[in-house]
Image (cartoon, rainbow, N blue to C red):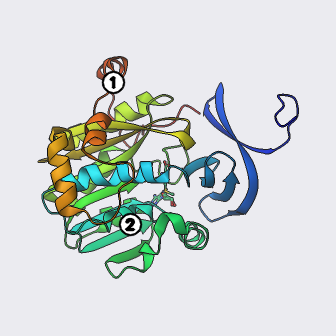
Amino acid sequence: MEYSYLEPRWLWHFEWQTPREFSADAVERVVYSGKSKYQIIEIVETFEHGRALILDGRIQSAEKDEWIYHEALVHPPTLAHPWPERALIIGGGEGANLRELLKHKSIKEIVMVDLDEEVINIAKKYLWKWHQGAFDNSKVKLVIGDGRKYVSEYRGEKFDVVILDLTDPVVGGPSYYLYTYEFYSLIKDNVLKNDGIVVTQATSLVYSIEAHAMIRNTLAKVFKKASSYKVFIPAFHSIWSFAVASDVWDPKELSKEEVERRISERISGELRFYDGETHVEMFLLPKHIREKLSKIRDIAYDKKPPSLPI
Ligand code: SAM
C-alpha cells in the first residue's frame, strides 16, 4: 500500500491559512532547522514542491515554483519603468529577486536590505538554485538591517524601483510595520525617485483578501496609481497577490505586445513564467474578487497594520 489515509507515514509541514483551515506538505527530509534572533528558519525537502524555505512556520518559496513568484514580483514593475538603473530590495532573503533583477540590461546597482543575516547565510549555502551566485555580483550591495529603519534614515541617491519581498504581516512578526501608510510614505519621501515604482508581495487572495485590499488601498493613498495582480503558486496552495504603485507608471496599462517588445529589448537570460500574455493575465482579476476588493475601503496605519487571519 503506497498511500494510506490512516498511516501518518511521513513528517508533515502544516501551515495554518485561517484558524479553521491548513495546508500540509509531506516532508522527505529536514535539511536545516534553527532559530535566529528574529525567526525560526527551516529548510526541508518536500515531496511535491522540492526544497523549501520556511520562516516562522510559513513557506517562503519552494524549488519547483519559486521562479513563478520571483518573476511575477520583479518583472512587471521593472519593465513598466522606462529604464531603471538603481533598485532597492527590502527582504528577499533567498536572493532570487537579485537573480531576476540582474537579467535587466538597464540595472547598474541593487541594494538589498534584509533583517536576518542568518537567512542570507543559509540561503547562500542551501538555496543555490534561487540566487545562482547573485550575492557575489559586483552590482549588488547587501545591507543587514531592518527595512523600515533603513528607509526612514536613508538620505542617499534615490531608486527607480523598490521591491518589497517581506514575510507576511503577522502580529509580532518582523515585517508587521512594513505594510502601512507610514512606511509607504517613507518610501515615497526618502528612497523612491519621483518617477519610481514600488511593488510588494501582498498575501493570499484566497485566505487574506482583506489584507491584500488594505495593502493596495494604502499604496493608492500614497501614490497616484496602484494596481493589484495575482498568480497561482502551488507551494503556497493559493492564488498569491502583489500590489504595485507609482505616481507615473502602471504595469497594468502595458499591452501584451509592449511587454514582449520590452522583454526582447531589455532582458537577457531565460524567463520561464513571464511573457506578454502572462503579464496581461496576471492583471485580470475575476469578477467576485473585483467586487470583494471594491467593498473593502480600509487603509493600513501603524496603529492597525494588515494581518493574516491566523
Ligand atoms: N516570498 C516570501 C513570502 O511570500 O512571504 C518572502 C520571502 S523573503 C525570504 C522574506 C524576508 O524578509 C526574510 O529573509 C526576512 O528576514 C525578511 N524580513 C522580514 N522582516 C524584515 C524587516 N523588517 N526588514 C528587512 N527584512 C525583513
- The image quadrant that residue 244 belongs to is top left
- 145 is higher (above) or lower (below) than 26: below
The x and y percentages for residue 123 are: 56, 68
Q: Which residue is mark 2?
A: 98
| Residue name at image x 81 percent, y 44 percent | 10
Instruction: In the rendered structure, find residue 56 and report the number of the disc placed on it.
Output: none
Instruction: In the rendered structure, find residue 293 and report the number of the disc placed on it.
Output: 1
| Residue name at image x 35 percent, y 56 percent | 271
The answer to which of marks 2 and 1 sits earlier in the sequence is: 2
Q: Residue furthest front?
A: 1
Which one is closest to the eye, mark 2 or mark 1? 2
Question: Could you tell me which quadrant the N terminus lies in?
Answer: top right
Q: Nearer the viewer, residue 57 or 284?
A: 284
| Residue name at image x 15 percent, y 52 percent | 261
Viewed as shown, does residue 6 lie left or right of 156?
Answer: right
Label 2 environment density (alpha carbons within 10 Å; few <14, some 14–19, many ≥20): many
Res. 1 in view: yes
The x and y percentages for residue 38 are: 59, 61
Label 1 environment density (alpha carbons within 10 Å; few <14, some 14–19, many ≥20): some
Res. 188 in view: no
For mark 2, give the secondary structure: helix
The x and y percentages for residue 238 are: 51, 34
Q: Nearer the viewer, residue 152 or 255?
A: 255
| Residue name at image x 39 percent, y 34 percent | 212
Q: Label 2 to label 1, Cα distance in Å?
A: 31 Å
Answer whether labels 2 and 1 touch (C-beta < 8 Å): no
The amino acid on which the numbered mark 2 sits, given as a three-letter code, is Leu
